[in-house]
Amino acid sequence: MEYVKNRAMEQEELIGLIEKYLRGTATVKEREDVLRWYRSVDHGRIEIPLENSLEKEEMRDRMHYRLQQYLTQNRPGRKITRYRWAAAAAILLLIASGSYFWVYFNHREIGNKAVASSSLMNDLPPGGNKAVLTLSNGTKIILDNAHNGQLAVQGKSKIMKVDSGLLAYNTQSSMQKLQSTTLQYNTLATPRGGQYQLILPDGSKVWLNAASSITYPTAFVGKERKVKITGEAYFEIVHNANKPFKVEAEGREIEVLGTSFNVKAYTDDPLMKTTLITGAIKVSNILLKPGQQDCIDKQTDKTTVKESNTDNVIAWVHGQLPLQGDDLATLMRVISRWYNVNVTFEGKVPQSSFVGRIGRDVSLSNVLNALSVYGIHTRIEGRTIIVSEK
């Protein structure tokens, strides 16, 4: 089959193949035809190698979102005008020119056009490994400037900066000696545009998202292990049946039974969300199963338990910014924390639905350009993103 720019195949045949592709009923050859045509529609001939299932799934999601809007207006039996076909082609061109956002995360080189389109005026860099450690005596250590190695000693624990973005507590004393240790607390806090990882004295791991904090003892003595957080944190807890682990957030307590889970408790979010990845936790006397999310409405104090896309919930831990699953206002709060910017809306907040993910290591303009694929209009003024309807 010959592929000519924007005329890869007869429009009726193409739409039929795309519908089969989106339904998952296309043959191997038909899928290859659609993908080959999809690569050819851009005037700049940006090649998009789709070598793994993740890239194919992401592209498929974006094709589905935009093409369904067009296909629903061109039902079988309804004549497809040249104008409507041009509109569909324009949508696909927009998707093709925006595809580099998804491939960029995998550090692929895809041509000068994509690189040039990301270089916008007033662009801002992404966040990084930034945090401040406050010791029990009030001393503050800026970790992004601190050297690797031992930073301080608190009680029986040595505080070590292992590398950029990782803080660890090395407790070598016996449990009997720890029981007589005077309890001391440290606080690790990330700014807007920061993140950090912490290994607690018991070996449990914590990832702190932007604008978050965790307060914890320098050694876990007594009958329980208890920490307090603000913002968002992901935990992987070392099991100890004789010393349960508890997390306090927004005045509520989460009882951990040896598990991994995510807590999102920002003061400016209307909901506090606790998502269980593995194991078991109890929130407000509700025992969660893996994959479930406990949502507490802060105004009404109403609790709702629902199934959750855990990959999206902890995507930030793996360096990704998920675009789906939240409304635009919620998504913009996430963006504002990571890029340390303010967000204002001109007019009402657009109602949009998103799919896919983008790397958290890209500049702000890349993220905003990705949103423009969904019709979201933005501009950057200083450290403020302005979202408008037009």
Image: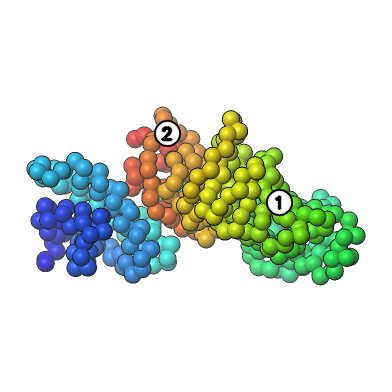
- Which residue is located at x 12 percent, y 56 percent? 13
Q: Is residue 147 above or below residue 315?
A: below
Q: Amino acid at mark 2?
A: Val
- Which residue occupies 17% across, 57% down? 17
Q: Position of residue 86 (x, y in %)?
A: 16, 47
The N terminus: image quadrant: bottom left
Task: Point out the tag, 2 or 1, that comes first from the N-terminus.
Answer: 1
User: Is residue 32 positioned above or below 96 on the image?
Assistant: below
User: Of residues 70 and 104, which is closer to you in this image?
Assistant: 70
> Mark 2 against mark 1, which lies toward the viewer?
1
In the image, 11 versus 309, the foreground residue is 309
Please give left or right for residue 10 compared with residue 256 in the image: left
Give the left or right position of residue 60, taking residue 243 as reference. Answer: left
Depicted 54 relative to depicted 118: above or below = below
Which quadrant of the view contains residue 238? bottom right
Q: Quadrant of the C terminus?
A: top left
Return the residue at label 1: 246
The label shown at residue 99 is none
Element type at mark 2: loop
Judging depth in this view, the residue of 7 and 34 nearest the camera is 34
Label 1 sits on what residue type?
Lys
Q: Residue at x 42, y 66 (%)?
A: 107
Q: Is residue 130 visible?
A: no
Q: Which residue is mark 2?
A: 349
- Asked if residue 223 can be seen in this view, the reply is yes
Callout 2 crowding tier (Cα within 10 Å): few <14, some 14–19, many ≥20: some
Give me the residue at 34% from left, 60% from top. 57
Name the residue at the right extreme: 180
